[in-house]
Image (spheres, grey):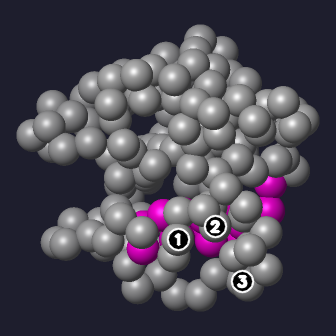
Amino acid sequence: MPAELLRDPTSFLDAPPGPVPSAQLGESPVRVLLAEDDRELRLLLATALRRDGYEVLEARDGNHLLEIMGESLVSSGGAPLDIVVSDIRMPGKSGLELLAGLRRDDWSTPVVLITAFGDPETHAEAYRLGADAVLDKPLDIDDLRVVVQALVRMRG
C-alpha cells in the first residue's frame, strides 16, 4: 500500500479489517507499543490488537513509553519496536514531543497518533513531525486495526 494512503486514511478506512496474515514479520510477532493514559481505552485497544496477533506493550504515559522503548532495545538486542501508537495529550511527554524526538534521532518506526483534540492544526503538526497516521477520538477500533495492518504490510 503506498505511503500516501496513510496520510489520507479515508482511502483505506472504508473496508473493515480482515484477518491479519501479516501480524508476523519474519519469525516473530509484530511488536506494537501502545501509549494511552486512559487505562480503559488502553486495555480495549491492546486487547483488539492482541486478538489480531500483535505483541502489544502498554505504556501509561509518555515517560513510560520512553522507558519501555529503552527496555525493549536492550531486551531485543537493539531491534526497535515495529509500530508505536500513542495518544497525543498524556502526562509527562506528549505524543508530539515523543514523535519529534524519535524523528530527530532518525528512528523510522511508524507512528500512529490518536487525539481527542483533532483540529486541523494538530493534524498538520503531527504530519509535519513525521506521523504516519492521525486518528481522532472517539476512536473506531477497526480504523486503528486497518492503519496498523497497512503499516505492517508496508514494512513487510
Earlier along the polypeptide chain: callout 3 or callout 1?
1
Along the line of sight, which residue is nearer the eye, 129 or 110?
Answer: 129
Report the side of 111 relative to 12 (left or right). left
Kind of residue at badge 1: Pro
Where is residue 68? Give x, y as percent.
36, 30
* Depicted 36 relative to depicted 100: above or below: below
Q: Residue furthest left?
A: 77
Where is residue 132? Give x, y as percent.
57, 50
- Tag 2–tag 3 contact (CB < 8 Å): no
What residue is shown with label 3? 16
Q: Residues within 10 Å of mark 1 (few under 14, many from 20)?
A: few
Kind of residue at badge 3: Pro
As measured in the structure, the alpha-carbon distance from the residue carrying label 3 to the one carrying label 1 is 18 Å
Which stretch is magenta? Answer: 139-153
- Does the segment drawn in magenta span residue 45? no
Earlier along the polypeptide chain: callout 2 or callout 3?
2
Q: Residues within 10 Å of mark 2 (few under 14, many from 20)?
A: some
Residue depicted at x 51% and y 76%: 1
**Label 1 residue SS:** loop
Where is residue 32? Give x, y as percent.
43, 52
